[in-house]
Image: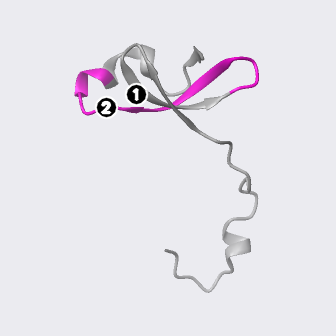
Amino acid sequence: MIWSIISEEDIFAGQPVDMPALRSVDHLGKRLLIRPGSDGWGEIVSLLSTAPADFLDGRFAPGTRIRL
């Protein structure tokens, strides 16, 4: 929540209105949140895990592209 005298239109000016749909998938035994592309590949947005070691594995780094 934002309490401001500045209008929401001014605060959020230039922000994308349409956010692309995210998808939850299993990849190599891990749950990932991805942004699917039109070419059959997806970009990792987030790793959904409770194991700290999973976040050190570069295969699950945000921005990595995976085959869907």
Element under disc 1:
strand
With 63 as the anchor, is 7 left or right in this view? right
Instruction: Give the residue pinned by disc 2.
Output: 49
What residue is at 70 percent from the left and 26 percent from the top? 37
Residue 40 drawn at (x, y percent): 69, 17
Quarter location, residue 10: bottom right
For label 1, the crowd category at 10 Å Cα-Cα, with few meaning under 14, some 14 to 19 and many 20 or more, is some
Badge 2 marks a residue whose secondary structure is loop
The magenta region covers 37-54
Given the image, on which type of amino acid does mark 2 rest? Answer: Ser
Q: Quadrant of the C terminus?
A: top right
Whether label 2 touches label 1, CB < 8 Å: yes
Q: Residue 29, image x and y in percent?
A: 36, 17
- Magenta stretch: includes residue 43: yes
Residue kind at label 1, given as amino acid type: Arg
Residue 13 coordinates in the image, percent (x, y): 74, 64
Marker disc for residue 42: none
Q: Residue at x 68, y 48 (%)?
A: 19
Label 1 sits on residue: 31
Residue at left offset 66%, top offset 70%: 11
Q: Number of numbered discs present?
A: 2
Q: In this view, does 35 lie above or below 66?
A: below
Q: How is the image coloured?
A: one colour
The one of 45 and 14 positioned closer to us in this rendering: 45
Foreground pick, 6 / 36: 36
Q: Crowding near pointer 2: few (<14 within 10 Å), some, many (20+)? A: few
Magenta stretch contains residue 8: no
Horizontal and vertical percent position of residue 66: 57, 15
Nearer-the-camera pick, 55 or 33 = 33
Disc 2/disc 1 C-alpha distance (Å): 7 Å
Position of residue 2 in the picture relative to residue 53 (left or right) = right
